[in-house]
Structure formats: C-alpha cells, structure tokens
Amino acid sequence: MSQYKALIVDDEPDIRELLELTLSRMNVETFAAANLDSAHVSLEQEKFDLCITDMNLPDGSGIDLVKDIQANYPNLPVAVLTAYGSMETAIHALKAGAFDFVSKPVDLQRLRDLVNTALKLKFKKTETVCEDEDSPILGQSSEIKKLKIQIKKLARSQAPVYISGESGSGKELVAREIHRLGPRAEGPFIPVNCGAIPTELMESEFFGHRKGSFTGAYEDKTGLFQAAQGGTLFLDEVADLPMQMQVKLLRAIQEKAVRPVGSQKELATDVRILSATHKDLAKLVDEGEFRQDLFYRINVINVSVPPLRERKEDIGQLAARVLAALARDWDMDLPTLSPNAEQALQKYAFPGNVRELENILERAVTLCDDEVITPEHLQLPTDGNPVPKPATSGQQDLPIPDFMEGDSLEEYLTDIEKQAILKALDETRWNRTAAAKKLGMSFRSLRYRLKKLGLDTDD
C-alpha cells in the first residue's frame, strides 16, 4: 500500500500518464483530474500529500487552484507545470503560494527531486512542534513574532527568498532558520559572501572547474552549487556580484544547471536559493548596477529583518543570551547588567544592530571586575559610533624591532607576538572573538596568549 497520495491536474492524457507512471514508481498513489472542477471534488474527498497542476486548464488557471489550496489546504504543497522558458509564469505561481514548478517538457529527474522534497514536508510538520523553543531568533516583539511566522511559512516553499536588512541585523540567521525548518534541513546549508570572492575566481567558485582548464587548475574542483546539492545556497551580499557574474548566475538559477569551467557538459542542480544584502537592491537596479532580470528572479519573496532599534523590548533577552554564551566560552561566572546599564542599552540606537550589541557586551565583560556590568563598562557613544578600547603606551604602534646580536630570541619573538595581538585587538575594537579569527587561532588559544603576555587586564 502506498504511503503517499498525490493529485495530478492536467487536461493532456499523455502528461497525466507520464506523471502517474513516474510517481507510482516512487510508491506514490496518484489521483487524476482533467480540470478544476474535478480537482476540487478530489480535494474534498481525499487527503493528499502533494498536488501537481498544469497552468492552463479548460475551465480556468492553475493559479486559481494554487490560491484555493493555499486558502483551504495550507499544508498541501502544490507544484505547477509551466511551458518551457515561461519564467514569468513560474514566478507568478510561486508568489501565489506554489511550492515549486517544473517546466515542460518534463525532466523526470527534476520531477523526482521535487516530489522527494515535497513529501519530506509531511514529516517536518510533526518534527517542528517545538521550533519556537529551538529557534535562535530571539525576541517577543511584534516584529519578531511576525518574522517567525513568515519564516515558518517560507520554509514550506521552494521559492527563492530575498532577505533585506541592515548590517548586523541577522540576515544569515533568518536564512539558516528557513533552511532548518524546511524539507531540505538534512541537506547542506552553504553560505557564500559574494563580496569576498575575487572576480577572476567567481565562476570557478560557483560552478567548479575541470583539471587543466586554466593555469593553476591542478585538479577538478566542486563548485558551490554542487556543494549545496539537495540543500540551500545562501548568497550573502549578492549586490556585490560583478555584472558578468550576474548574467551567469541568472542562467544557472533559471536552467537549474551549471557548467564547470573547462567542461562541455552541464550538471543538473537541486538547490534552493536564498540571498541577502544590506544595500538597497531595487535602487541599484534603477541605477543600472544590478540586473533587473536577476533581481526579479531572486526576489520572488521578500523578507525584511527589523533593525534592533525597532524592537528594543528584545534587547534584554538578547543581552542575556550573549552574556550566557560569554560565560560559557570564557569559563567564568555569569555576568549581569546593572539596572543603569540596562537603561543605557535601551536608550542606545544600535546602528550596528545585534552584532554591535554582542561586541559591546563582550568588551564590557572584559572591563568589569565583579561580574556586574555598569554603563561605564558599556562605553556607549553619543554619536552612534562604538568607542574603541583605548590604547595603552602606544604599544600597538611600535614598529617590529630589529633582532640584534646578543638579544634573546625568545624575548624577540614574544615582542613580535605581543604587537601582532595588540594590533589585531585594536583593529577589531577589542572584540576578542574577531581578533582570534583575524589571527587565525581559536578563541581559547587567544585567551591563553593574553594571560601569558599579561594582556588580560583592563590595560
């Protein structure tokens, strides 16, 4: 007996037969309807796990069926069949609430991937009962509650999502949560900072390359699209993509296939695309700096992450989580905020959002002596810019000394190590986690060196 049931809505007998045969081989029981009226009757009589509908039906549009299912059967994923190259129609269907789409003529592997992903939703419903407790997105403000509802809904779709928001507001966290709550959760989540990849290496990084395809290509390389197969590819700072790469990325998304550099063969991809940037992408489109067709393709659904200043009632909960994490990582007693420090945080505008709150609290913990953080430890500015940790004795500005005959090699190396650490701390405004990353060492390793060099005091 089949474990799943699917409704197939299409007026072409050949298409219905192809879909029924393919799904039956996947142990899915199928029910067929040739028009909207028959589809509505079936929906009333049976409980389905998936619906696949053509866009053009004798008595109406597949979009109407998508909207009806969204309204009356919100847990039923519905995929649409679109004409080849009709991307505008597919995007219209996704905006209306379709789970995903398949172009005609139907690619059977693409169809099987879609069906497998959709059927996983049946189990995700029971597995995510406690998702609010597990969510890394903290807050009880109306803005955050609305965001969580939106994330939960988007997790059930395969539509591309564009996440907008200021720097430090938590855009990647939102992307990870959409992935975690969706049917691709067991697949990889691959984040990529589009602005951090050298232009000349972009095509190789995204699509991979074949050995010998260019100077330095000593072996085959798997691209980011392939690495994200079966999962989610998160394009952070997508606005930083050069125009030439935007063209190639658009084709890869639309064709659901990539061609590695130096290869004559395209590789099919099964990847969900999420993207984000702190820049105004619509404005960049108007200015001709970002392709309108790519923007239209990745911005099927928009999620806006609220800045911290618009949800100040969440600051207390966020601060508690940050301080608990610091206490755990630094193996120390849990620091607390004094009432005046809490008031100071509530009054601050946080131009750097949650990331700035984390940095401010980390600096404050290094400054307080008795595990109680006061406003003085917070060092909040009045001009909106964080106050850097004051330098002492100008040590970080000293040039690396010359090694002279008779000097102690150990002391010489210690001086170089000390200056490198001080320079990294100064450049990261005494954010020790960021400094450790900059120095290429673990946080605990940096703590050990700070104690060894006598740099773990307030000075």
Image (spheres, rainbow, N blue to C red):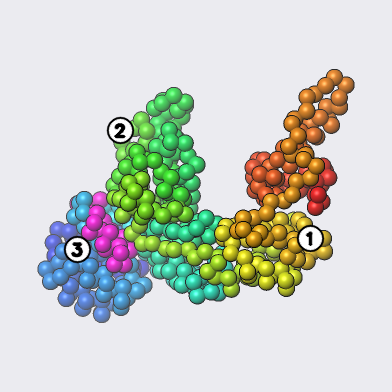
Residue 317 versus residue 104: which sits nearer the camera?
317
**Residue type pointed to by label 3:** Met
Q: Quadrant of the N terminus?
A: bottom left
* Residue 385 location, quadrant: bottom right
Q: CA distance from mark 1 to mark 3?
A: 64 Å
In the image: residue 303, left or right of residue 316: left
Q: Position of residue 198 (x, y in %)?
A: 47, 36
**Residue type pointed to by label 1:** Cys
Inspect the magenta stretch and tell me whether residue 135 lies in it.
no
In the image: residue 417, left or right of residue 289: right
In the image: residue 375, left or right of residue 107: right
Query: Which residues are the magenta region?
Result: 87-107
* Residue 28 location, quadrant: bottom left
Q: CA distance from mark 3 to mark 2?
A: 34 Å
Residue 345 versus residue 306: which sits nearer the camera?
345
Q: Residue furthest bottom?
A: 44
Could one spot residue 176 in this view of the protein? no
Q: Secondary structure at mark 1?
A: loop
**What residue is pinned by disc 3?**
55
**What residue is pinned by disc 1?**
368
Could one spot residue 388 in this view of the protein? yes
Q: Residue at x 78, y 24 (%)?
A: 402
**Residue type pointed to by label 2:** Gln
Q: Residue at x 29, y 47 (%)?
A: 255
**What residue is pinned by disc 2?**
264
Against 428, residue 37 (above or below) is below
| Marks 3 and 2 in Cβ contact (< 8 Å) | no
